[in-house]
Structure formats: C-alpha cells, structure tokens
Image: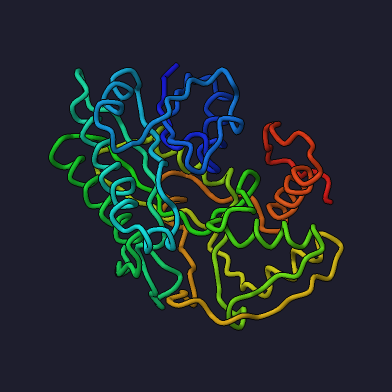
C-alpha cells in the first residue's frame, strides 16, 4: 500500500485525514510544528516529526520516502496573518514552495501533492455561487498566500511534472476544531458557548451567509484528489453549495442542543465578507465527490463531540458518518 506524508497531520482536518488513511490500510507519517495541533489527535503508532514545512532539509528527507504528500500545514488565521505578515507567509507560501520543490526533486519520479487552498482567494466576490473560474481578489495576506500556493503549484505541474491538485476549503467544521482557540470556526465557538449556557455574540446583523462543509466530506475530497492526481494543476471548491446565515446557524445550534441561547449583536468585523457561497459542481463532475453530510447531521456530530470534551470523556474514537446520539 502507498505511504503518505501529511503535513499538519496533528491538526483539525489533518487528524481526520490521518484517521481515514489508516482505516484504508495506508502507511502514514506526519510533519507538524504543533502550533495548533496535538499528537493526542492521532494514534500513537503514527510517526510524527516535529518541525516546520519551511525547513527544506526536513521536508526533503520526509518526501524521499513517501508515495504522495497531503499538504495541510498552514497558519489558517486571517487575524494572525494581519499581525504577523512575514511569519505567516513563511509557513503558508514559502512552506508550500518547499513541499513542491522537494516533490519535484525526489529521485525516480515527482511525488504527487494534494494541498489545501481556501475560499479566501475569492475575496468579497458577489458573483455567487462562486465557481473556480470566478475572479480572485483576496482581501488578506492569508488569502494572497493561498492564491500564491495555487500559482506555484501550477508551475510545479507545468514546468516540473509534479501532479499537484488544490482544494479551496470553504467553512470547514466538525469534531476536533478547538472552540477555545480565537482562530476557530464560528460553529465550534457558538456550540461551546451554548452548551456551557453562555451567551453568544454575532458580529453585525447576522445576515452574513456562509457555506459550511463537514470535515469528513473534506477528507473525501482530499483522498479523491490523490487517487486521481494529474499534472493539470487543477483546483476545486470544497463546499456544500448550501447558504446558511449566521442567525440561522445560531438558531439551529440552539434547537439541536435543546436550549434557547442568549444572542447579542456586536459591531461588524472590518472586512467581513457578506456572502461566501461555493459551487461544488466541478468536484462532483471531475472527481465524483459530493458533500454527503447535511448541516443538521454535521451539527449533531459536532455538538456531541464538544459535549463529550467538556465533560472530560474520551473523544478520540473515529468520527464516523453515521449519526451519533444528539446531546
């Protein structure tokens, strides 16, 4: 069976991918700087090298012994990228180039690379639902670096024959997304506060629209991308195609948790995108992947996991697609 390197494999999405690859019978090794991830997210038998993807010697040594690389390591925070522009650039863009360079230099043949991009490359584009050929105009350093990743991945494919496929993640949510992190997604933050009986604050009027996609559907996309890796330099949206307002999300979480949360409104965030909604048709047609988890089911899974974590119970069992008991 193939052996894969997963960068960022101790993190939220990466740990779910590691779990899936192991379940499929593959050998897996992980590179992670543990800045946001934790070794406790993955089985102890998985080798973890603690280091940065911007370290060319570490990356080259690890790429040399695998059949493919899933590159998920990133500083996935617009706020942090604003505060530490150069530092996050070193991880997000220079780190990706380091991966691609090692993949093309590997003796024998180039190593296929499946990498994470972001819907942040679109910026505030009102032409929704967004297709992959929509105008890209990022509004943050994070979005600019992710667009740069796509451009360099295309060069890796065209000039060096590296099979490189990118995935523009929309609003990913699910178990293991740390609700205590200031950089976490709105679902995990709202869910944790609601379960704790604390009020939630919605920035602005709450009519902002988002496209939420469950983490196991994201993993399905990544696995399909590796299975069908080509040198076309393709990039795909990973999204549900279903619009949900922040107000509607808060109501759903309250109903699923059996509570009526206290909801307050604060000032809108500077630069907050009004509508982020993707078109998933290309990935369905070309890779055969469709997001199978409804928002209702995904929220139930997430609430159950956060409830277990808050109670101090074991949360490390695999997160299956089958519906767990609601809290």
Quadrant (top left, top right, bottom left, bottom right) of the N terminus: top left
- Give x and y (percent) for residue 161: 18, 34
- Give x and y (percent) for residue 147: 29, 57
For the residue pair 89 and 115, the one nearer the viewer reads as 89
Residue visible at 51% across and 43% down in the picture: 36
Answer above or below: position of 200 versus 296.
below
- Residue 219 in view of the camera: no
Residue visible at 53% across and 42% down in the picture: 13
Answer above or below: position of 109 versus 318.
above
- Give x and y (percent) for residue 47: 48, 20
For the residue pair 230 and 117, the one nearer the viewer reads as 117
Return the residue found at the far right: 258
Answer above or below: position of 253 versus 20.
below
Residue visible at 73% across and 48% down in the picture: 306
For the residue pair 185 and 281, the one nearer the viewer reads as 185
Q: Is residue 97 left or right of residue 11?
A: left
- Residue 172 in view of the camera: yes
- Give x and y (percent) for residue 8: 45, 37
């Amino acid at each position: 069976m193939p052996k894969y390197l997963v960068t960022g494999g101790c993190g939220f999405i990466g740990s779910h991918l590691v779990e899936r690859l192991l379940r499929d019978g593959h050998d897996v090794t992980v590179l992670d700087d543990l800045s946001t991830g934790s070794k406790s997210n993955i089985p102890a038998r998985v080798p973890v090298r603690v280091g940065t993807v911007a370290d060319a010697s570490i990356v080259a040594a690890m790429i040399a012994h695998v059949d493919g690389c899933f590159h998920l390591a990133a500083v996935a925070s617009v706020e942090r990228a604003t505060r530490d522009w150069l530092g996050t650039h070193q991880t997000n863009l220079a780190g990706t180039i380091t991966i691609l360079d090692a993949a093309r230099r590997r003796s024998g043949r180039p190593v296929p690379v499946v990498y994470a991009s972001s819907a942040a490359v679109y910026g505030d584009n009102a032409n929704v639902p967004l297709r992959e050929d929509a105008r890209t105009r990022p509004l943050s350093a994070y979005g600019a670096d992710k667009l740069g990743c796509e451009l360099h991945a295309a060069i890796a494919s065209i000039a060096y024959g590296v099979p490189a496929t990118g995935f523009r993640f929309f609003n990913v949510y699910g178990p293991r997304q740390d609700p205590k992190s200031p950089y976490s997604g709105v679902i995990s933050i709202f869910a944790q506060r609601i379960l704790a009986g604390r009020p939630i604050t919605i920035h602005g009027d709450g009519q902002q629209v988002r496209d939420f996609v469950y983490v196991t559907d994201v993993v399905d996309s990544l696995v399909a991308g590796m299975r069908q890796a080509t040198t076309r330099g393709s990039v795909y949206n990973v999204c549900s195609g279903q619009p949900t307002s922040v107000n509607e999300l808060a109501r759903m979480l309250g109903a699923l948790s059996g509570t009526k949360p206290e909801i307050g409104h604060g000032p809108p965030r500077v630069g907050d995108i009004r509508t982020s909604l993707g078109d998933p048709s290309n990935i369905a047609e070309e890779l055969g992947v469709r997001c199978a988890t409804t928002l209702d089911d995904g929220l139930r899974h997430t609430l159950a996991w956060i409830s277990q974590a808050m109670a101090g119970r074991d949360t490390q069992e695999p997160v299956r697609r089958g519906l767990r008991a609601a809290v």
